[in-house]
Amino acid sequence: METWDTIRARRNVRRFSDDPIAREDLDRILEAGWRAPSSMNWQPWHFVVVTDRSLLEALSATGPGTGHVASSAATVALVAYHPEDDVHARWLQYDFGQLTAYMMLAAADLGIGSGHAGVRDQHEVRRVLSLPDDTVCPYMVAFGYPADRPLRPVGTPDRRPFEEVVHWDRW
């Protein structure tokens, strides 16, 4: 896919088919996240790739918007050590947002759907993934082939009007 088509085709997928994702495709998605920019090249992230169905089901109970994780072919838990201060906490949120977008676009380019999820129950995610106590896992990204329809560029997305969002020179 061309980059612009990939951007227009990417959408949140919450229902996945049973088809597995090839290891080389998962590696490409992970490399996209690994290559994402970070504040001052800090690179605070660790990725825990989960494909085991029982673990995916357990992770699907770690937040109110995490149910789709159970049916994913793979979910990547985004993990970092606890930020040392508020500045690093803000950097972490921004950096995780960028790497999430990179991974989701790489997946869409391969025809693989994705859906992000926020983790509320840190104790449970640490238990399920055997994470060290001094880490945090604020987000997960579920990946799989869409169950309903393949990814394709959307001509008229469900977005606020462009003219309402874009301001030139001043508000």
Image (tube, rainbow, N blue to C red):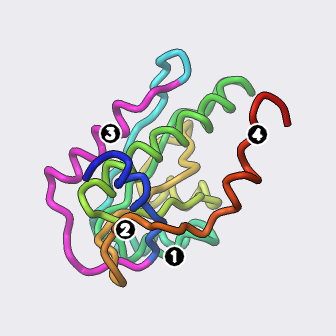
Label drawn at residue 67: 1
Q: CA distance from mark 4 to mark 2?
A: 45 Å
Between 108 and 134, the residue placed more toward the observer is: 108
Q: Is residue 99 magenta?
A: no
Residue at 70 percent across and 62 percent down: it is 160
Relative placement, left or right, of 94 versus 87 is left
Which numbered disc, 4 or 3, marks the residue closer to the eye?
4
Q: CA distance from mark 2 to mark 3?
A: 24 Å
Q: Residues within 10 Å of mark 3 (few under 14, many from 20)?
A: some
Q: Is residue 1 above or below residue 114?
A: above
Q: Residues within 10 Å of mark 1 (few under 14, many from 20)?
A: some
Q: Residues within 10 Å of mark 2 (few under 14, many from 20)?
A: some
Disc 3 marks which amino acid? Ala
Q: Secondary structure at mark 2?
A: helix
Relative placement, left or right, of 106 versus 27 is right
Where does label 3 land, which residue? 32
Disc 4 marks which amino acid? His
- Residue 66, located in which quarter of the rendered image? bottom right
Q: CA distance from mark 1 to mark 2?
A: 13 Å
Between 135 and 76, the residue placed more toward the observer is: 76
Among numbered discs 2 and 3, the one appearing first in the sequence: 3
Point out the stretch of residues depicted in magenta: 15-38
Residue at 56 percent across and 36 percent down: it is 134
Q: Secondary structure at mark 4?
A: loop
Label drawn at residue 167: 4
